[in-house]
Amino acid sequence: MASASESGTAAGSGTAAGSGTGRKVTVYGAYGHTGRFVVAQLRDRGFVPVLSGRDAEKLRAVALSVGPAASPSASASASATATATATASASASASTSVSAPGLEVRPASVDDPASLDRALAGADAVINCAGPFATTAAPLIEAALRAGIPYVDVAAEIEANLDTFAHFSDRARAAGAVIVPAMAFYGGLGDLLATAAMGDWTTADEATVAYGLSGWHPTPGTRTAGTVSRERRGGRRVRYTGGRLEYHDDRPTLLKWAFPEPMGTREVVGEFTMADVVTLPSHLAVPAVRTHMTTEAATDLAASDTPAPTAADENGRSDQTFVVDVVVRSGDTERRAAASGRDIYAVTAPLAVEAVHRILTGRTRTVGVASAGEIFDAPDFLRALSPHISLEPPQERTVS
């Protein structure tokens, strides 16, 4: 990801020199799986990450393990040694800034507003990577509003994203603040693709986001967030139809979906609903939004013994591959946009960091709470992700 110029021209490298201009970005949940990728991506882009989260020892372990060219895998491999070193020097309380070689550490808890204020002091933006976002999003947003800085999160929780729009839209707009929820693989990438596919259309009859994952090894954070969401909706399923969210008890259906090659036609779980049912309708006039998931991935997620992802390359990415295939339909015309890549957690990092970069360099289209497709130039944003995803040429066809 390399949008190095203010004109939005992609430089073609994931390490665009100086693009962050040394600006500080607080990463809350910096020691989590996705948080480590975000920290590495910020450093690659020339930002200065400030590590924050509840666990001071884990934060110091990350700080001590980060070198000049650190990656999540490098951080993970050094974790045990770093934790021991950090524990030996763990004299600071969880509410104070801690010095450690490498990166600044600022422990904070979402139930302690003063600690959050210290975590964000002097920062230019904050990225929240700590789920469940039903617990962390509102306190972090409040802290960002007090600090007068942009807030970006990677929430995939449907209800947490709904809460962000419902509770903060008016206040953020009045303050001229920028809050971008779901700036991640789920909710963000699909929204950008759908917005790009819409093109000059102002309305469409329906939008479908089909997730072609080779498999899904969920992180502990993913499992916890999923449990919170299921509890909030009483175990019911959710869909977006007729211009509104609808909770229901219908059994899942299996469908066939023709993904772009080389994935081809695969079986998917129909209406395997993800955060796109919040982000797309927040700005697109589409009364029906559906998301589908390949059965392999859905089965992995449902199994309690599916292990967490493991690094398979020098950048810490797993061997998971994905295709996100988006189709919007108006009458008998369909428009399609698709992207493919590797590791849904790893690709979230360039999505979130590119968002912060564009916000801080003034390349936004609105203020307040806004999803990716509304606040950014979707086609240009997707092109800037070219080192991390491959884009299919846009397609339009007439359907019978």
Image (cartoon, rainbow, N blue to C red):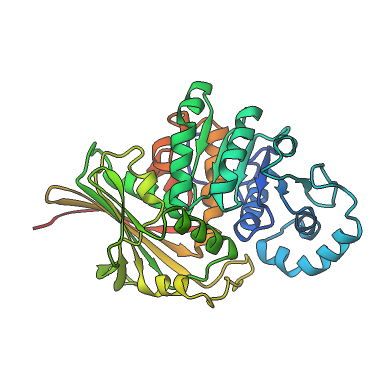
Report x, y in % for residue 111. 68, 42
Answer with left or right where residue 77 lies relative to residue 265: right
Residue sitting at 58 percent across and 36 percent down? 141
Q: Residue furthest bottom?
A: 305
**In front here: 16 or 33?**
33
Vertical position of residue 191 compared to residue 358: above or below:
below
Residue sitting at 29 percent across and 73 percent down? 267
Report x, y in % for residue 292. 32, 62
Q: How many marks?
A: 0
Q: Quadrant of residue 287?
A: top left
Which quadrant: the C terminus?
A: bottom left
Q: Quadrant of residue 115?
A: top right
**In front here: 277 or 389?**
277
Q: Quadrant of residue 366?
A: top left
Q: Residue furthest left?
A: 400
Say if residue 181 shows up in the picture: yes
**In front here: 67 or 210?**
210
Vertical position of residue 264 compared to residue 40: above or below:
below
Vertical position of residue 286 compared to residue 386: above or below:
above
Answer with left or right where residue 91 lies relative to residue 35: right
Report x, y in % for residue 10. 49, 45
Residue sitting at 32 percent across and 48 percent down? 194
Say if residue 260 shows up in the picture: no
Report x, y in % for residue 215. 45, 73
**In front here: 368 or 259?**
368
Q: Residue furthest front?
A: 234
Answer with left or right where residue 70 lies relative to residue 399: right
